[in-house]
Image (cartoon, grey):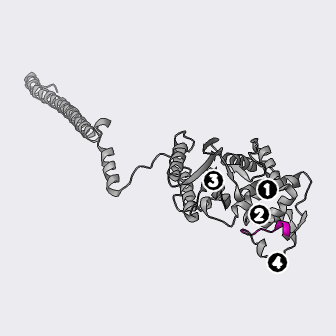
Amino acid sequence: MELPVNDAKEKQPNQKPKLKRKYRRFLIIIASMLTVTIFASMSGIVWARFVGEQRTEEILPLEEQSAPEAESEVDSEVGIEPEPEPIDPCNPDVIPQLLSTFTQAQAEIGVEFAISYYNINGNCTFEQNADQAWLAASTAKIAIALMTFENIASGIWTPDTWISYNAESHFEGGAGPLQFDEAFTGATVSELAELMITQSDNIATNMLLSQLGWTIGTQEYIARITGIPAQDPSQNLISAHQHLLIMQHLLNANTPGHSEILLWMEQASDRSRLAAITNPDGTQPVVAHKIGDYWDESGVYYHDVAYVQGENPYLLIVMTKSASGVRDDIYAQITDLGQQIQALHTTP
């Protein structure tokens, strides 16, 4: 059935309000979304500025930071000081100044010193009065031991070559156990050389020298090894520099007797002078040394020839002469000098 015309006309006006409501809802939704977007954007900007300010406060430029000062204050409070830079013993100002100051101070009290120093790793040498030849005393026994092993190497002797003891020509007191051995009749050359170095035995020395040419033979050997002519071949003379050259020869692994003589010098019964030095931490370095004491109308002589081993090994020869030196005082002075030099070779 068809609707009356009037009914159709009455329904058309009723659709307009519905369309308007839909349109308003759509606008409201769009406006809400825009509002949320704008709010979120503004919030992000504000947050970024806030974080940036926080980071600016936390990470200051290097020149404005105070952390190092704070650490320094803490270190000073607990007494921690920065470690000193290690001193290079081969610095041309270090050892010479130490040696010069020491020898001048000793000269003022009547003790003359001759010193020779050689740094093995750095290959540097420093000396004071080192060309002056003094009575060698028992330090000449290093050269005599080298002569002994040279004879063995050349086939003149074997380590077991026997030397008979003759009291008239060999006896001498002063040092070594053989002077007290009434039953002693002789020994091999290797046994005599060991006693001569470890105990500084004078009888053992004389027994070897009787076959090697006594003082003249020793002086000729020293002149040959060092290239320095003897001032007086009849006198037991040697300089600190000659001792240095003899020790450098001994340290050569190809030198006959190299290992034996160094081991005996490490085992020397006298542990005074340079053998008494210690490291800064109180430990003792390995020191192979030979001492010499002698006195006559010309003066009193106390010497030490040492090879100080370690990470930074070196040779140190100290020779002294005085009119009437007090032994223990001069021993202490030699140890004191060695202590100062050893401190330069130890990592702090």
- In percent of width and height, residue 210 lies at 86, 60
Q: Which residue range is magenta in the image?
A: 168-175
**Are discs 2 and 3 less than 8 Å apart at CB?**
no
Q: Earlier in the sequence, mark 1 or mark 2?
A: 1
**Are discs 4 and 1 less than 8 Å apart at CB?**
no
* C-alpha separation, residue under disc 4 versus residue under disc 1: 25 Å
Left or right placement of residue 207 versus residue 121 in this view: right
Q: Earlier in the sequence, mark 4 or mark 1?
A: 1
Q: Secondary structure at mark 2?
A: helix
Q: Earlier in the sequence, mark 3 or mark 1?
A: 1
Query: Which amino acid type is marked by label 4?
Result: Glu
* C-alpha separation, residue under disc 2 versus residue under disc 3: 20 Å
Name the residue tied to disc 3: 319
Residue sitting at 58 percent across and 64 percent down? 327
**Are discs 3 and 1 less than 8 Å apart at CB?**
no
Name the residue tied to disc 2: 196
For this orientation, the residue located farthest to the front is 297
How many residues crowd mark 1 within 10 Å: few (<14), some (14–19), many (20+)? many
Query: Which amino acid type is marked by label 2?
Result: Met
Q: Quadrant of residue 322?
A: bottom right
Which mark is on residue 182?
4
Residue sitting at 90 percent across and 65 percent down? 162
**Are discs 1 and 2 less than 8 Å apart at CB?**
yes
Query: Which amino acid type is marked by label 1?
Result: Ile
Q: Nearest the camera: 169 or 241?
A: 169
Q: Secondary structure at mark 3?
A: strand
Which mark is on residue 144?
1
Q: Earlier in the sequence, mark 3 or mark 4?
A: 4
Left or right placement of residue 275 versus residue 138 in this view: left
Q: Secondary structure at mark 1?
A: helix
Residue sitting at 54 percent across and 49 percent down? 103
